[in-house]
Image (cartoon, helix red, strand yellow):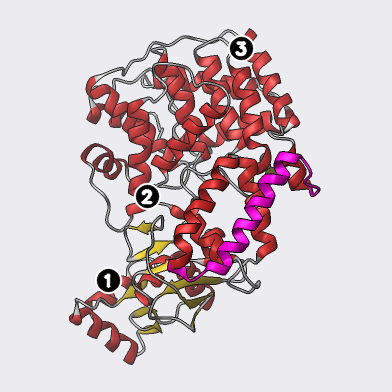
Amino acid sequence: MRIIAKKRQEIADLLFASASDNTTARQLQRGASNGELQRLAPGIYVQAGIPSEEVAALVKRNWQKIAAKLAPEAVVSHKSAIKSGIHKDDIITLSHPTIYNKKIRLPGLNFVMVKGPSSLQGDMSLPEHTLFWASRPRAILENLGKKSRSRMGRDEIENLLIDILNASGEVKLNEIRDSAKLLAPLLSMEKELAILQTMIGALLGTHARGKLKTKQGQLVAMGKPIDKIRQERMQILAAYLRTIPLPAIKDVASGGLAKSHSAFIESYFSNYVEGTKFDIHEAQEIALMDKIVHSRPKDSHDVLGVFHLALDSPTRNAPPPPGDAFLNTLQQWHEQLMRQRPEVNPGQLKSEVNYAGTTKFVDPGMVRGTFEACSELALSIPEGLARAMFYGFLVSDIHPFDDGNGRISRLLMNAELSRIGLCRVIIPTLFHLQYVDCVKQLTHNNDPAGYVKAIALMAQWSSQFDYSDLPKLILNLIKTNALEESPIRYKLMNVDGSNIKVV
């Protein structure tokens, strides 16, 4: 069987029978009959003999594709819509108007089907699948009721509303209430709507009177609480940046093809180090020819998102204004960058604490206040590379979003450089681990020296290239080992073949 033989030569993957391709469907059925394939669910197969834990991992990685196969036009809903998909107990909840009141068990994952309408206003489409993601107002209504394996319950929703109020203010709660009012009749959830309206009304009223008693509620009552540890760290960085001499490197790709090529290379590396890995020539077609890789549409849009934001240099005409306006701008960038990934809440500030290894980032309730205080501090730092470094670390250290923080931090740093005609900083794959080590030194030890040296070094390195000639540019990047991943086996070089300085 040709289709099965081909799969044997590849990393084990799931196989899907297509309703429009009877030949493939029959081949897969025969493969299951003769023991070459294992049937997981109607139309879904995997090679026989794969260890059960690997099959479970495959199922979890491909759960959106599986969900679209099991229940086309279904909506990721209830707890799953708020908890970014898979619950900690390995459950995905899907709403569907005709496929419901059933549980579909697969290795490592259970799909719980509940009755509910398909896509409603505000629900987000997953374009590579016939699948939708419930909007936040819809998901909040769906979770208001008796707590269950698929429903969070009133207490958790109240905490979520407090987090949203902390992070995004009273306007966002009012928007949720208004949207829920329109959705409730379509969901037959008028009772849940009444509960939600009471909760939001009480929360806003208590907020105004400053009488919230819980730890989270006290943060609300404080208005815009600040993470004092982060604020002190940013003050240390700012003081260092005010005194350290830094180069002012003129932009070598300020217009024309050079600007487009520079934006592409920036997007390629910024995504690659975050795990969105393409061959550089494949990434070139995505960014410069708008060619989506059909098997990886979300990853393709990640590349396009950074490319367009890098090309536009959104803060070119003025520095980011401190306070809410600054953070709102970043939310707009995040929405543009992550719009194909509804599971990470594009454009929304995080509502749960996030971590990187042992590093805990700013509590959601302190994000807005910390940004306001520290973005005002940025204006006390000299324009140019110094202030750009500050902006880059500010986003990195606060981590205001569920995902995409590294890409947003580098875009903000470079937007500040482009604003005054300086060369943008590209951090190649081979240097990324060293860069991360320097960031950790600042995060854990309040020592900014390594971070500042690393960015300054990459500013010099990035300015060496001729961005107008893309084939030559790619060859020079290869020549410098920039595309390599192992700093043990390779050293990052200058274009002329000399070694770069060690940070």
Q: Residues within 10 Å of mark 3 (few under 14, many from 20)?
A: few
Tell me the tag on residue 299: 2
Q: Alpha-carbon distance for marks 2 and 3?
A: 38 Å
Q: Does 199 appear in magenta? A: yes
At label 1, which amino acid type do we have?
A: Lys
* Quadrant of res 390: top right
At label 3, which amino acid type do we have?
A: Ser
Q: At x 43% / y 42%, what residue is drawn?
A: 335
Please identify the quadrant where the N terminus is shown: bottom left
From the viewer's perspective, is residue 240 above or below residue 150? above
- Seen from the viewer's position, the closer of residues 478 and 363 is 363
Q: Secondary structure at mark 3?
A: loop
From the viewer's perspective, is residue 158 above or below residue 46? above
> Circle 3 sits on which residue?
380
Mark with earlier residue (2, 1): 1
Q: Residues within 10 Å of mark 1 (few under 14, many from 20)?
A: few
Give the label, 2 or 3, closer to the camera. 3
